[in-house]
Amino acid sequence: MSAMRKKKSAKTLKGDQTKALILETALEMFQERGYEQTTMRAIAEKANLSLGNAYYYFHSKEYLIQAFYHRMHDVHLAASVPALENVNTLKARLSVVMRLKIDTLKPYHQFAGVLFKTAAHPQSPLNPFAEESDPVRQASIQLFESVVAGSQARIPKDLRAELPYLLWVYHMGIILFWIHDPSPRHRRTYRLIDHTVELLDKLISLASNPFMRPLRKQALRLIDELRDAAEEVLDDEPGD
């Protein structure tokens, strides 16, 4: 390796370490003080960095949360891919991915509750449905695409096209339940996953019945309308 490459590699490594330091410091302070009460200046000071250096890596607090979303997706994906290798049924594959989602989120349960206060607002850039969250949202939907594609389930084309997005919405509902779940080791959340995955598997199988085609088409049209309505709410700025 040339001296120039070594220098560039060392610089990249240092930059990655600085980014990780800023993110870890921010997450710690968000849990201690709350998202709104934590400033970029305070994060920089606690990380022993200049404010300009902190802004160089993260232009705002919102970018820090988006980095957190990316990290959690990457951790979830890394756990899910090998776990899905020898699992063929849709029910089992969905169960694996959903349980691993909660497993990987566990260390951040308190922080998730703090973040929810801000992220739940329709116009918040931290909202999982917001435009700013689209890269992570699409990556997560792709994971559910692989869940469906790798299964032996026979699913009509129209339902198969919408199913990854529907499963992503479902998984967001499970996360919301988990945020409010005070049960030991989040047992209620895991039970909810078991029951709802079984129910979803049966509903998907039922919807695949040729006699259910008219009802399935109607349900999919309704889902399109609800998605369009949600996008309009996110696009509307306060005061418009």
Image (cartoon, grey):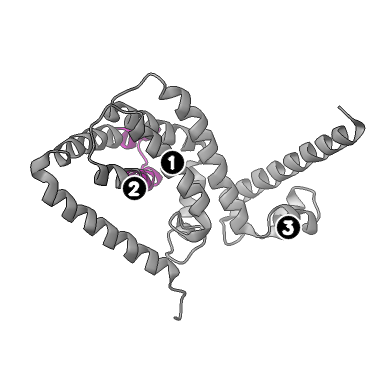
Q: Position of residue 82 (x, y in %)?
A: 47, 23
Image position of 2 (left or right of 233): right
Q: Which label was assigned to residue 55?
A: 3
In the picture of the structure, the residue carrying the numbered disc 2 is 173
What kind of element bears circle 3? Answer: helix
- Is residue 194 rendered magenta in the image? no
Crowd tier of the residue under label 3, counting other residues whose Cα lies within 10 Å: few below 14, some 14–19, many 20 or above: some
Which quarter of the image is occupied by the C terminus? bottom left
- Is residue 169 rendered magenta in the image? yes
Q: Earlier in the sequence, mark 1 or mark 3?
A: 3
- Give the mark toward the camera: 1 or 2: 1
Q: Give the residue type at disc 1.
A: Gln
Q: Residue furthest front?
A: 157
Q: State whether residue 173 appears in this view.
A: yes
Q: Main secondary structure of the magenta part?
A: helix
What span is in magenta?
167-190
Q: Give the residue type at disc 3.
A: Tyr
Q: CA distance from mark 1 to mark 2?
A: 18 Å
Crowd tier of the residue under label 2, counting other residues whose Cα lies within 10 Å: few below 14, some 14–19, many 20 or above: few
- Give the mark toward the camera: 1 or 3: 1
Q: Which label was assigned to residue 142?
A: 1
Image position of 121 (left or right of 20): left
User: CB under 8 Å between callouts 1 and 3?
Assistant: no
What kind of element bears circle 2? Answer: helix
Q: Position of residue 101 (x, y in %)?
A: 43, 36
